[in-house]
Image: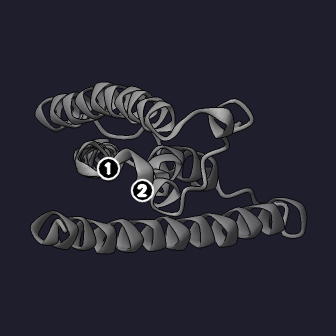
């Protein structure tokens, strides 16, 4: 029914899956690095000064890497006791309001993330101990938020074009 839109959503969903996989890899790196930090601190009595800062800086991109994937999988918690009793048009309106709120929040945080990335790039700010550029930590999170906003917008357009009986 909507071949062009469905194809575009399919492309974005592939990017969503790859971004979530990258986030999972970062979580694994954090897990190994934290384990190494605990081992060196308590077994070797030589704490790794970098582990705390590195894992803290990686929390921002990891926090948002799976945001769009959760939307793709319909994994956000929701209470449907009331919406299940609504007629089809009522369910569609509730879903539209929900997606509009998600898109609004996503756009707000996308703007904040992109702005922070640009500001940190322009300032040349780096982390205190690692001396890694801060924009390298802001950019993946900003990318994840922008991708989430694009995906939410596409899902909103698809929902608007879908008949209420199919929602």
Give the class, few, some or many, for how many residues have Cα within 10 Å of label 2's Cα (few <14, many ≥20): few
Name the residue that disc number 1 marks. Answer: 163
| Discs 2, 1 touching: Cβ within 8 Å | yes
| Helix, strand or loop under label 2 | helix
Numbered badge on residue 166: 2
Q: Tag 1: Cα neighbours inside 10 Å, few (<14), some, or many (≥20)? A: few
Q: Which mark is residue 143?
A: none
Residue 8's image quarter? bottom left
Circle 1 — which element? loop
User: Looking at the image, which residue is at 29% across and 51% down?
Assistant: 162
| Quarter of the figure that contains the N terminus | bottom left
Question: Viewer-proximal residue, 63 or 104?
Answer: 104
Left or right of 82 in this view: 144:
left
Note whether 158 is above or below 111 in the view shown: below
Check the image and report above or below for 26 versus 61: below
Colour scheme: one colour
Residue at the limit of the structure toward the right, as seen here? 43
Q: Which residue does the image show at 82% across and 68% down from the upper left?
A: 39
Quarter holding residue 82:
top right
Q: Is residue 132 visible?
A: no
Q: Position of residue 62 (x, y in %)?
A: 50, 54
Question: Which is more toward the observer, 9 or 128?
Answer: 9
At x 84%, y 61%, the residue is 45
Whether residue 20 is visible? yes
Closer to us: 31 or 54: 31
Q: Residue at x 32, y 42 (%)?
A: 138
In three-dimensional space, the C-alpha distance between marks 2 and 1, rounded to whole angstroms, equals: 6 Å
Q: Position of residue 126 (x, y in %)?
A: 31, 39
- In the rendered structure, the answer to whether residue 16 lies left or right of residue 80 reads left
């Amino acid at each position: 029914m909507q071949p062009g839109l469905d194809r575009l959503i399919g492309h974005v969903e592939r990017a969503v899956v790859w971004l979530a996989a990258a986030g999972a890899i970062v979580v694994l790196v954090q897990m190994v690095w934290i384990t190494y930090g605990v081992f060196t601190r308590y077994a070797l009595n030589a704490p790794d000064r970098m582990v705390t800062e590195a894992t803290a800086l990686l929390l921002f991109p990891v926090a948002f890497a799976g945001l769009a994937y959760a939307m793709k999988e319909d994994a956000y918690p929701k209470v449907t006791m009331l919406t299940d009793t609504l007629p089809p048009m009522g369910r569609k309106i509730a879903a539209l309001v929900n997606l509009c709120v998600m898109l609004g929040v996503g756009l707000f945080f996308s703007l904040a993330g992109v702005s922070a990335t640009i500001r940190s790039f322009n300032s040349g700010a780096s982390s205190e101990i690692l001396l890694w550029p801060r924009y390298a930590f802001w950019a993946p999170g900003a990318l994840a938020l922008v991708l989430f906003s694009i995906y939410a917008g596409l899902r909103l357009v698809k929902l608007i074009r879908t008949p209420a009986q199919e929602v």
